[in-house]
């Protein structure tokens, strides 16, 4: 069975580790205790919407991207086809910049369809 808090925690941990940041750095930036952030990442605690927003801000990631990744992971676990509506090269570029979605504003998206 898919547990939403575990998927959210996995996505947050993956993002933090891709950025090469420690729990201490992110917990300080998000203004949450290191222990609580660790529990959220391990799927042991549910993050409120306010806490999730704070963690996303600390990771410099739009919450929509985090929730999209969570949604895609759940869809795959459920055997649902995941439509590719965000170009892979755009997401790769975003992640290569450490998730800073505000940089690279000159990136143009081509409408799908």
Image (spheres, rainbow, N blue to C red):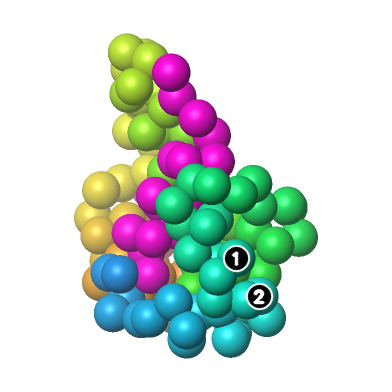
How far from the left and from the top, in percent, is residue 97?
31, 77
Q: Is residue 35 shown to the viewer in this render? A: yes
Q: Could you tell me if the residues under marks 1 and 2 are in contact, i.e. CB atoms within 8 Å?
A: yes
Residue named by callout 1: 36
As for residue 73 lying within the magenta part, the answer is: no
Predominant secondary structure in magenta?
helix
Taking the spot 66% from the left edge, 69% from the top edge, the residue there is 54
Q: Is residue 104 shown to the viewer in this render? A: no
- Observer-side mark, 1 or 2, equals 1
The N terminus lies in quadrant: top left
Rendered image quadrant of residue 4: top right
Q: Residues within 10 Å of mark 2 (few under 14, many from 20)?
A: some
Taking the spot 54% from the left edge, 47% from the top edge, the residue there is 44
Taking the spot 60% from the left edge, 65% from the top edge, the residue there is 36
How far from the left and from the top, in percent, is residue 11?
41, 51
Q: How many marks?
A: 2
As for residue 4 lying within the magenta part, the answer is: yes
78 to 100, vertically: above or below: above
The C terminus lies in quadrant: top left
Q: Residues within 10 Å of mark 1 (few under 14, many from 20)?
A: some
Residue 82 in the figure: left or right of residue 57:
left
Taking the spot 28% from the left edge, 69% from the top edge, the residue there is 18
How far from the left and from the top, in percent, is residue 79?
32, 13
Per the rendered image, the range of residues in magenta is 1-16
Which mark, residue 32? 2
């Amino acid at each position: 069975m898919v547990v939403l808090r575990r998927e959210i925690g996995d996505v947050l941990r993956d993002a933090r580790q891709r950025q090469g940041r420690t729990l201490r750095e992110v917990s300080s930036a998000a203004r949450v205790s290191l222990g609580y952030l660790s529990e959220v990442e391990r799927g042991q605690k549910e993050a409120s919407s306010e806490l999730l927003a704070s963690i996303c801000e600390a990771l410099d990631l739009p919450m929509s991207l985090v929730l999209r990744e969570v949604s895609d992971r759940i869809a795959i676990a459920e055997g649902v086809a995941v439509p590719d509506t965000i170009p892979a090269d755009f997401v790769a570029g975003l992640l290569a910049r450490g998730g800073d979605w505000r940089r690279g504003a000159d990136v143009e998206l081509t409408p799908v369809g």
